[in-house]
Image (spheres, rainbow, N blue to C red):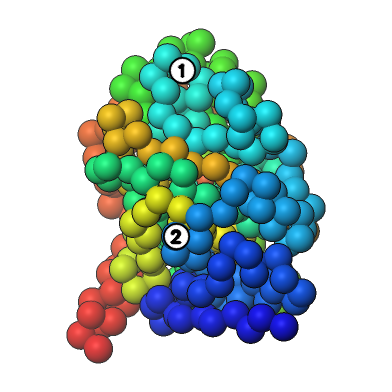
Amino acid sequence: MVRLDLQPITPALGATVAVTADDVLGEGVPEQILGALDRHHVLVFPQIHMTDEVFLELTAALGQMHANTVTDDGSEASDKGIFRIALDKSDPTQLDFIKGNDYWHMDGMSYAVPCKASLLKCVSAPREGGDTGFANLHAAYAALPASMRERLHGLRVGHCLSAVGRRMYAEPTDADFARWDAVFPRLEHPLVWHQHGGDAALLIGSTANDIVGLDEAVGGALLEELLEWCTQPRFTHRHAWRDGDLVIFNNPALLHSSYPYSEAARRVMHRTTLQGKLAIDTRAGDLLPARESRQKQTNSLKSGHRPILDWSVTWSLNEQKSSSRKA
Ligand SMILES: [Fe+2]
């Protein structure tokens, strides 16, 4: 039986996996990959150069493939049920989705059961930009001061697609909000997601819109502070793509984001997704406020306005960061 050779990338997350495309479906190999995914969260198979057929077989060997709504681009990959990720400025719906990936997020926040993992195959490496960043939410939560974990306990957070849209669009229109709300209306998740095995992850990132029961500005500032905390270098890894790379990531343990790139970079990725098993205690959210109020939120986001918090979030997080820098 092939034994996987794993090399950790950082103490917090990631491992490179040395295995060929011929051996990746060998007896016991998918099981070893799943075990490694639980431990390291991001598995990099450098330049493994697998065909779409092997890519699909590996996906099936690892779990139940999530039926993505594939891109309607007439490509061979889409015909096979593979989601093709490439910038195409002629398709505004697709552009929303692709550009939205440039912000830290967890996939599947519009579901009560987010996907277990995504597999990304690099068909054409970007000529410039387009790296993918990963942040270990389990490690970031465990490193929070106990007093902060107590404060966050029991809070709930509203997620929706328009939270992402407001970051991307300077002047969103009613039609923009209607398009986003049709895809992913507001849902309320717990801010701290306690997962199987005792690990916890903060449900934050670009789709996080508000903290239930907190003033809009205070809740927004708390979400930004927590995002800053979780994406510190000590919890993150940034992958620079080369043709033929495969990366598998453990979605519920991470935030991820792509670094900006242009259409000229000609970045093309193929993605498959595994259905999740871990449920969040999710509720349908209240309706979003009227557009006028949301426009106001947009403007405060753009101006970088950061209100002074009336509780000690800023102080305790900064204190922890500066003491960790000294260590
Ligand atoms: Fe994503």
The N terminus appears in which quarter of the rendering?
bottom right
Q: Residues within 10 Å of mark 1 (few under 14, many from 20)?
A: few
Residue 35: x and y, percent? 67, 76
- Picture quarter with the C terminus: bottom left
Q: Check disc 1 and report its element: helix, strand or loop.
A: helix
Please tell me in which quadrant of the rendered image residue 241 appears.
bottom left
Mark 2 and ligand 1: say if the CB distance to the nearest ligand atom is below 8 Å. Answer: no
Residue under circle 1?
Answer: 92
**Observer able to see residue 201:** no
Which class describes the residues within 10 Å of circle 2: few (<14), some (14-19), or many (20+)?
Answer: some
Q: Amino acid at mark 2?
A: Gln
Label 1 sits on what residue type?
Answer: Pro
Residue 47: image tag:
2
Nearer the N terminus, badge 1 or badge 2?
2
How far apart marks 1 and 2 lie (CA) works out to 32 Å
What is the x, y in percent for residue 271? 58, 44
Which residue sits furthest front? 22
Residue at point 49%, 11% (across, down): 174
Residue found at the very far left of the displayed protein: 326
Q: Position of residue 51 (x, y in %)?
A: 59, 49
Position above or below: 91 against 197: above
